[in-house]
Amino acid sequence: MGPIRGLRRKRKIEKVVDQNAALSSLPYQPESLDWWDHFSKRITGPSSQLKDLPKFESVLKISRKTFNYICSLVKEEMMARPANFTDLNGKLLSLNDRVAIALRRLSSGESLSAVGDLLGINQSTVAQITWRFVEAMEARGLHHLRWPSTEAEMKEIKSKFERIRGLCLPNCCGSLSDSLVLKSSTFFKLSEEGKRLNGEKVKISEGTELREFIVGDLGFPLLPWLLTPYQGDSLTDSQANFNKQLSATRMVAQRALARLKETWRIIQGVMWRPDKNRLPRIILVCCLLHNIVIDLEDEVRDEMSLSHRHDSAYRQQVCESGDDSASILRDKLSLYLFGRLPSIDSST
């Protein structure tokens, strides 16, 4: 009696699953240092000499230490499910290969065909590997994107904002840029309900306490927890000084967004049509990668050139809405900053 139809194919699939399961059960060990030599020859050609190979950091925008950590995060999801990803020569792609391909796609912003041609891989393989990496990062890397969980963490953030360029903007916890995004966010709802920016208050004058707040540009509404600049040309000295301090603080957000976009250029690059529908998830993963580089104190981050503008085509919008109590608070804070009110005093 002949074999049951389909049984041979079923056994083959089960074998692949077993192999992948066995691989995923092993603790992650970084591949040997010559892995990069082999991988980089995909870019320069197999006849390239060792001295001609590109530097790891110049291609993937991160250090080997950070790369190994990312591989350890995504290993299980990248390798557990059966997927015979190969290059154009039929060679099976390792975990390092797959992560490097995804990082190259996200950091360069190049099209799928450009990345595929550069690395000798089919563009559909580049797409599948990149998306699997995105899913793996969502599953394993979310702890790198969170609101400060302790008062000590928040105090450190506020202290850094207060020391910007020698200025003194008390109780500021961050900067924002785009009103529509803010109002549709969970952060807006939580802040309005007093569940965010609800830490220690500071006393800026008799009977006036300043809660934790963030700053925004003129496109945002003026709120007790969101302070914006004064409008107009005929400003008092205290108002002009206040605007100056807010502008210096907002530069932190400008630089952060500029670095994010310059490092992970897929955010501003050519998007393959299916990627466009997944853009929010891709941006999330780029933010996770960005924070991992910061958390691991990756030295490559400090070596990158940085512009201060993240969106040269941005047109300043003006939001006319505001809160009366926030307007009064802003006036008192501007006077305090200008030195007309007593020195700051912490209160519980």
Image (spheres, rainbow, N blue to C red):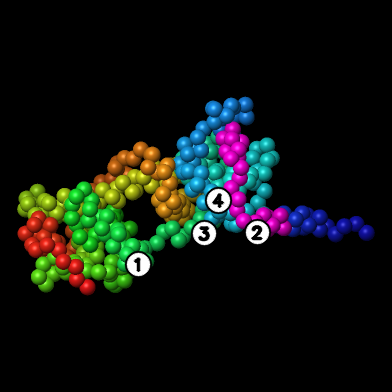
Badge 3 amino acid:
Arg
Q: Which element type, helix, strand or loop, lies under badge 3? A: helix
First in sequence, mark 1 or 4: give its number: 4
Judge whether residue 178 is colored magenta: no
Q: Which element type, helix, strand or loop, lies under badge 1? A: loop
Residue at numbered disc 4: 71
Q: Contact (CB < 8 A) between labels 2 and 3? A: no
First in sequence, mark 1 or 3: give its number: 3
First in sequence, mark 2 or 3: give its number: 2
Q: Which residues are magenta?
A: 18-41
Of 91 and 166, nearer the camera is 166
Of 19 and 281, nearer the camera is 19
User: Residue 25, which numbered label?
Assistant: 2
| Above or below: residue 159 compared with residue 128 | below
Of 167 and 133, nearer the camera is 167
Point out residue 272 in the picture as x, y percentages from the top left corner.
Answer: 50, 45
Query: How far separated are the C-alphas under marks 2 and 3?
Result: 16 Å
Residue 195 seen in the current view: yes
Query: How far separated are the C-alphas under marks 2 and 4?
Result: 14 Å
